[in-house]
Structure formats: structure tokens, C-alpha cells
């Protein structure tokens, strides 16, 4: 192993990769990316080498934090800063903000696995793949630094830093886990579904509803779990629906509909978050989902395991702080329309956004008469509604909020014409696919028929709705990333807990930490004596994210925030 850094050679960055033989290599670099030295170590010595290098708080450059960070956290090592080459490659490859984006490469196409491999970083049974080798990582980091230097301003750099910090947060939340009370979860399941059934059997309340549906349809037994066969049973009973979706069923006036909808709701709970889910995903008092930073094309997060983004409200009481700890729960009121007001610099819409309820502000503006109309209109504007109540109300917003509406209308036109749109920081939408281009090309042919022209117009409108929403949802995702980064940074300054929480792991058992994130909602798990301080941090972090993303523009992005022992209480 090489000698550690001297005091005058502390690196600004450390690139972590493998040699051709599979050993680990830490390449120390200065602020300009110039190499200062290398350290090679075997797998069992890597945690010590990383911990020693982390004392200088360098920027850790890795292929993907999804693979490299979990084993470090398991070893009790937390990284302060990082640059995820895989995530940033996707941003810098696709952005329209650069005349010369990072060249696309099959080596840097992001793929995800269903299960994390916590010890993968320390396994060297075979030589490293080319993508993991240190020279390839150094070359890609050079390409990305060059691209960021070509950027017209600092926004892309901020986006890459926020995306990478988000990846740190995602792995830290999986490592710490969301406190989960199994006994409460089981009680809630029994209240909703009945006693735990034998494997393969329906819970009692679902079975009872299935019998009631069959009776109301006039059949001895209904294949209630098979949509095609259920649809035929419904048709035989005169319920002429095109699908078994709950939205379509809810419009039907038939005595079988109410028990059928109740069955579908319970079936969803049983399948998605029932006893099998509890056994698979909750261990040692923690739910540990797998988050995918930037897993949605707009930059929103996704989940590849555990369904973290779809926890039903009915199970929130099972999210319960450890003894001596509390939960700080916060979510943003109407984030996306507030972001639209700020990114468009629409002062009238920003005025409507003052206060906890933007929709009431829209009513006060005179654009619509009721809060319900305001919600329909605003959501219709962001999602491109052209029919129904939303379609009727959206034109009123153009008169009252001209800048906000001009921004989304312009994004929609760009999409309809086959163009690319970008978020405030520079994440760009994908170009239209070949099927879209072929449809437009066929429609422009002199011999095209009416059906081809209608199909092309329909696809163009669909793409316009996508790009209309992309710029708003994507910029809202950027605000959330900045919020998370600020919370993470500020929480790290709090002192150690008086009462440890061992299930949170070696890094977080004595530290206040982020435990859950869902688009515009966070949960912090913190020592009871730090609950007020943690709540103040969450508020201040939201203000800091707003000032960072929308400097000089007065926009309120308020939080609904509370401190509680569990996530199911309203107060």
C-alpha cells in the first residue's frame, strides 16, 4: 500500500476504481483534475484507505454510488461529497444546454438490479470489468469536467452535484432504514383484511366480498382476480364496461360495483403491502427500500424494490420512531405550481402562491370562482388538459397568469414540433422516437389519408403534453434534490444522540438522519432532544433550496411540518 497524503498534498478529489488485476486504486487529484498520486490496496484494506482519505473531505468520483457506497456505509464510513459518473453521464449526454454534450457510450448506459449487493465492493474473485477500471473512470471524469467547463453558466454543474448528493442520500436512507413497527402493521392488516390466511388463500374479508360480488352478478362464483374473465361476467350482468379499472367501474350504477371496488382495494393492500411484503422488506424494525435516483425521465426518483413510493396512507401508523427518538415529517404544499410560478417569473402567480394554499390564491386572483375549479385549472395547465372541466378553465389562467402559461404553452409547442425541452438546471427531455418521426413523416406525404393525419396529430399532442409537464415536474425534482442536500448537510452538524438506535446501522445509530423521501415529502428520524432543531433544519433547508434555485424572485414554498412518534397521526 502506498504512503498516505502529506499535509500539502491533500486531494480535492479521489477517483475510486480497480486495477486490471482487481485491486482497488485511489487516485488523488487536485482541483483541476491533475493527478497527485495513487494508492493501491487489496479489498480488505479498502475501508481503512477510504476512511483515511475522507478526513480531507475530497470529492469521491465513482462509477456509481449504487454499487460503491452501500458496503462503505456497512463498514461505518460516510462520504461527505461524491460525483456519480453514471448519473452525471446521462445528464451531460442528453442535455440541450451544451453544443457539445458528453459523447454517448454503451459503457455508460445505466442499468439497475433488483437487489443490492452490499459486499460487492470488496469482492475481487475475477478481474475488474473495463467499466470499473481506473483508467476508464479517469477518462470519463475528464470528459465530464470538460463538458461542464463548456457550459454557459453554473446550472449544469449544480444539477450534477445535486444528483450525486441525491445518490448519497438514497443509499444512506436504505442503510438507515425507515423505522417500522411490525406489530402495528400486522394489526392494521388484520383490521382491514381479517386474520392472516394460509398461504395461497384469500383473507377472510376479501373472500366475503368475492361471494357478495358473485351473488350480485347472479353467478355461483366469479373469477374476480382475472380481469378478462371478470369482464365477461360483468357483461353477462349487463355492466357494459370496457375494462375493470376502478375509475370506470365507479361510474356504473349496479349493486355489484360497491363490493367489487371494496375487494379491489383490499386486494391491492394484500398484494402490495400484505404479510408477504412485511416478511420480505421489513427486518430488525426497519423498512429498507431500494431507491433509484433520477429513476424517472424527469429526474424524479423511482424504486426498484419495496414499493417505497407507494406506501398507502392506511399503513403510515406503522412508521414509528425508536424509543428516545422522534420523527420530523414534512411535505410541500403544491410544489409543482409554485415552481412554475418561480421559473416563469410570473409575479401574479407568485402572489397567488403566498400562503399555505395556492388554489385559494388562484381564486383570490379572480381567474376562477372556487378552489375546486382552481385545482382543475392549474393541473390542467401543467398536464395539457384540453377537454372536460380542466380544458374549459385553462384559458382563464392565460389572462391572469400570462408568463406561467406562456412557459408551459411554449414547452408544449416545442414537443409537438419534435423538439427537446429542458428543466431550469438543464436536464433535457429525450427526442421523439422513430415511431413518432415515422408517423409525422407519413402524415406529411401528399398521398397520406385522413387516418394517418389524425394519428400524427394525436401523437404530436401527446408529446406536447409530455414536454409541457416535463419542464415543471423536472424543475420541481431539482428543488427537491437541493432540499435533500441541504437537510443532509445541516443534520450532520447535530451532536450524537444520547440514546442510540442500533437498527439504523453503524453510521446513523447516533445521528439524526433522513429516513424517507417521496417527491415532495421527507421524514427525518432524530433523537428526541433534537426534534425541534431537526424541524428547524428542514424548514431552513427548504428556504435555502428556494433561494438557490430561484435567486432574486419572491416565491413562497411552505411546508406542512410536524413532530410525532409515528407517521399516521394528523397532529
Image: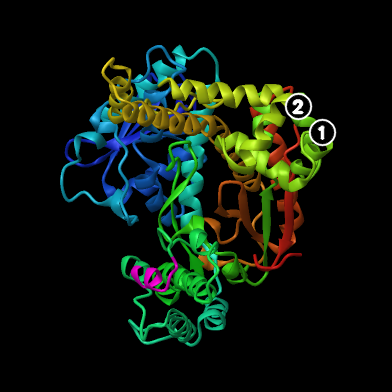
Residue 548 at what x, y percent from top left?
66, 28
Circles 1, 2 touching at the beta carbon (< 8 Å): yes
Residue of label 2 = 400
Q: Residues within 10 Å of mark 1 (few under 14, many from 20)?
A: some
Residue of label 1 = 365
Vertical comparison of 387 with 267: above or below: above
Residue 528 at what x, y percent from top left?
71, 64
Secondary-structure class at tag 1: helix
Q: Residues within 10 Å of mark 2 (few under 14, many from 20)?
A: some
Task: Specify whether 496 is left or right of 557.
Answer: left
State the image quarter where residue 2 is shown.
Answer: top left
Task: Specify whether 334 is left or right of 455.
Answer: right
Q: Quadrant of the N terminus?
A: top left
Vertical comparison of 86 with 146: above or below: below
Residue 254 at what x, y percent from top left?
52, 72
**Can residue 65 be seen here?**
yes
Residue 488 at what x, y percent from top left?
60, 45
Query: Which residues lie in the magenta part?
Result: 232-239
What secondary structure do most residues of the magenta stretch adopt? helix
Secondary-structure class at tag 2: helix
Q: Say which residue appears at 20% left-offset and 40% top-offset.
A: 128
Q: Say which residue appears at 68% left-offset and 52% top-offset.
A: 330
Q: Say which residue appears at 63% left-offset and 67% top-offset.
A: 321
**Can residue 176 be seen here?**
no
Vertical comparison of 163 with 73: above or below: above
Furthest-right residue in view? 364
Q: Nearer the viewer, residue 237 or 192?
A: 237
Q: Nearer the viewer, residue 473 or 443?
A: 443
Q: Nearer the viewer, residue 495 or 67?
A: 67
Amino acid at each position: 500500500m502506498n504512503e498516505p497524503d502529506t499535509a500539502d498534498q491533500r486531494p480535492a478529489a479521489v477517483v475510486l476504481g480497480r486495477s486490471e488485476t482487481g485491486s482497488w486504486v485511489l487516485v488523488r487529484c487536485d482541483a483541476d483534475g491533475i493527478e497527485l498520486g495513487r494508492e493501491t490496496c487489496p479489498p480488505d484494506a479498502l475501508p481503512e484507505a477510504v476512511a483515511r482519505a475522507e478526513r480531507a473531505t475530497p470529492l469521491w468520483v465513482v462509477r456509481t454510488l449504487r454499487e460503491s457506497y452501500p458496503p462503505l456505509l456497512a463498514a461505518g464510513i460516510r462520504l461527505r461529497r461524491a460525483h456519480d459518473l453514471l448519473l452525471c453521464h446521462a445528464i451531460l449526454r442528453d442535455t440541450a444546454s451544451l453544443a457539445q454534450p458528453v459523447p454517448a457510450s454503451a459503457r455508460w448506459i445505466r442499468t439497475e438490479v433488483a437487489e443490492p449487493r452490499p459486499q460487492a465492493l470488496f469482492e475481487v474473485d475475477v478481474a475488474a470489468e473495463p467499466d470499473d477500471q481506473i483508467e476508464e473512470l479517469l477518462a470519463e471524469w475528464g470528459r465530464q469536467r470538460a463538458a461542464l467547463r463548456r457550459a454557459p453558466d453554473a446550472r449544469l454543474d449544480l444539477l450534477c452535484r445535486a444528483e450525486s448528493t441525491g445518490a448519497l442520500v438514497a443509499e444512506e436512507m436504505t442503510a438507515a432504514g425507515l423505522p417500522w413497527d411490525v406489530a402495528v402493521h400486522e394489526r392494521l392488516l388484520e383490521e382491514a383484511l381479517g386474520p392472516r390466511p394460509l398461504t395461497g388463500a384469500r383473507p377472510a374479508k376479501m373472500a366475503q366480498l368475492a361471494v357478495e360480488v358473485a351473488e350480485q352478478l347472479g353467478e355461483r362464483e366469479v373469477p374476480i382476480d382475472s380481469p378478462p374473465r371478470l369482464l365477461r361476467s360483468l357483461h353477462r350482468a349487463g355492466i357494459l364496461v370496457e375494462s375493470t379499472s376502478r375509475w370506470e367501474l365507479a361510474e356504473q350504477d349496479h349493486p355489484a360495483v360497491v363490493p367489487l371496488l371494496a375487494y379491489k382495494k383490499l386486494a391491492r393492500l394484500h398484494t402490495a403491502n400484505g404479510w408477504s411484503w412485511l416478511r420480505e422488506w421489513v427486518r430488525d424494525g426497519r423498512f429498507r427500500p431500494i431507491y433509484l435516483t433520477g429513476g424517472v425521465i424527469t429526474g424524479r426518483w423511482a424504486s426498484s424494490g419495496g414499493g417505497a413510493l407507494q406506501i398507502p396512507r392506511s399503513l403510515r401508523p406503522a412508521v414509528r420512531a425508536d424509543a428516545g427518538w422522534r420523527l420530523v415529517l414534512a411535505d410541500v404544499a403544491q410544489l409543482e405550481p409554485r415552481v412554475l410560478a418561480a421559473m416563469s417569473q410570473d409575479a401574479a402567480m407568485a402572489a397567488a402562491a403566498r400562503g399555505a394554499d395556492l388554489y385559494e390564491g388562484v381564486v383570490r386572483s379572480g381567474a376562477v370562482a372556487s378552489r375546486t375549479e382552481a385545482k382543475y385549472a392549474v393541473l390542467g395547465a401543467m398536464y395539457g388538459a384540453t377537454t372536460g372541466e380542466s380544458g374549459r378553465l385553462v384559458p382563464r389562467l392565460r389572462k391572469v397568469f400570462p408568463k406561467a402559461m406562456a412557459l408551459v404553452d411554449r414547452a408544449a409547442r416545442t414537443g409537438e414540433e419534435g423538439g427537446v425541452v429542458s428543466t431550469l438546471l438543464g436536464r433535457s427531455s429525450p427526442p421523439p422516437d422513430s415511431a413518432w418521426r415515422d408517423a409525422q413523416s407519413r402524415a406529411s406525404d401528399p398521398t397520406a389519408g385522413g387516418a394517418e393525419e389524425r394519428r400524427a396529430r394525436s401523437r404530436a399532442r401527446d408529446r406536447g403534453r409530455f414536454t409541457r409537464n416535463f419542464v415543471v415536474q423536472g424543475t420541481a425534482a431539482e428543488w427537491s434534490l437541493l432540499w435533500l442536500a441541504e437537510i443532509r448537510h445541516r443534520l450532520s452538524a447535530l451532536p450524537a444522540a444520547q440514546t442510540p438506535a442500533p437498527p439504523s446501522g453503524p453510521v446513523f445509530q447516533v445521528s439524526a438522519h433522513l429516513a424517507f423521501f417521496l417527491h415532495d415529502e421527507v421524514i427525518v428520524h432524530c433523537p428526541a432532544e433534537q426534534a425541534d432543531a431537526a424541524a428547524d433544519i428542514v424548514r431552513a433547508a427548504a428556504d435555502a433550496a428556494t433561494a438557490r434555485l430561484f435567486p432574486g424572485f419572491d416565491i413562497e414554498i411552505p411546508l406542512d411540518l410536524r413532530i410525532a412518534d409515528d407517521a399516521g397521526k394528523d397532529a
